[in-house]
Amino acid sequence: MESQVTYGYNDAWKAIIRPQRDIYKEEDLGLKSFLLDSREFKRTDLNIKNERGLILRCSFFEPVDSQRAAKELPCVIYLHGNSSSRIEAIPYVSLLLPSDITLFCFDFAGSGLSEGEYVSLGWWEREDLKVVIEYLRGTGRVSSIALWGRSMGAVTALLHADRDPSIAGLVLDSPFASMNRLTEELLNKYASNVPGFVLSVLLWFVKKSIKSRANFSMDDLVPIDHVGSAFIPAQFIVANADDFICPSHGVLLYEQYAGDKHLVKVEGDHNSKRPNHALSTIYIFLFNTLMVSTLLPGHKLQIPNVSKLAYPKHVIPPPVSMIVLDPKEANLEEVEDEDLKKAIKDSLVTYELENEQSKFG
């Protein structure tokens, strides 16, 4: 039993603050200059220092200056999961840029190519996000900002949301409600045959180890305590077969979230490619909450048809075909693609909420 407990202890704290690091090469980010829908876009790589003095490796995807629809454009900041990196955002370049929605992604400290030894599943990552937002606000090149986070990135967005009401929208894919609860679930998974009183001792050691290594307390990392004071429109996504962060975490956060909200349940596990209808729904949600058509007159909602889009890792996919359509006026009988039809139907709730908000300024 001693060896089993030791094994469970080591696996538990490493799974939390030192998962496998996603190491990649700069060329994996794709071309620095590329075409989408016959327009030229660029990728700018840059470094930002966080408040702990660690360098964050970042990438900013936007139109070239000669083809910008405006000096300031809407922006989505993509926040990756643990054991991942900014590479995770690459498939969404061609999803967002044709609508003049820029994309900023970066490696959290302790992840990818950024400096730092440990991650914290949101605790220190929210401070990384803070300096990134401050940087973008200072460039004079972005207008509205939305956050799209997965797993650790979704928790980071939640922890930031209640202190920054200027954020336009949140896409929250597979967040957890409480780190203590998540850790207990991990311990039960890695040391399932260990008696309960031993697991309690094990949890105490895991907490102590995380505190000494990553300098934060698990007891303080409770996203559910933040949702009651967050009012930014949010779209929650949970996967039914997620065995790392159980879907019940996301459902609980959704139920207690104070702002306008929408829950999307999808097939798959924690790291599965999200189904086409979910990606289309995310796009519609971001277009509306970022107020693209208001900030960029003449821009109509272009619902992406992603049914044939592949998502190979470390490769920018081909341009997404678009369907120009107002979802509120969509005749679902005329839409042949079932995924697209579901996305339009799912988006109507959010679309109507945005229209109601606009009536009151």
Image (cartoon, rainbow, N blue to C red):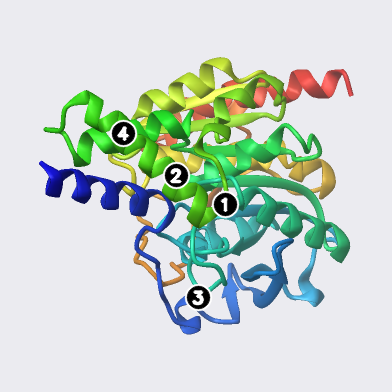
Identify the residue position indicated by label 3 in the image.
Answer: 29
Residue 269 lies in quadrant? top left
Pick the residue in front: 11 or 301: 11
Residue at the image position 47 percent from the left and 66 percent from the top: 87
Identify the residue position indicated by label 1 in the image.
Answer: 215
Residue 71 lies in quadrant? bottom right
Residue 260 in the image, given as x and y percentages of width and height: 66, 21
Identify the residue position indicated by label 2 in the image.
Answer: 208
Picture mark count: 4
Q: Residues within 10 Å of mark 1 (few under 14, many from 20)?
A: some
Q: Is residue 135 left or right of residue 310?
A: right
Q: Residues within 10 Å of mark 4 (few under 14, many from 20)?
A: few
Please, what is the three-letter code of the amino acid marked with disc 4? Answer: Val
User: How far is mark 3 from mark 2, CA to CA?
Assistant: 37 Å
Sequence-wise, which precedes: disc 4 or disc 2? 4
Please, what is the three-letter code of the amino acid marked with disc 1? Answer: Asn
Please, what is the three-letter code of the amino acid marked with disc 3? Answer: Leu
Identify the residue position indicated by label 4 in the image.
Answer: 201
User: How far is mark 3 from mark 1, CA to CA?
Assistant: 31 Å
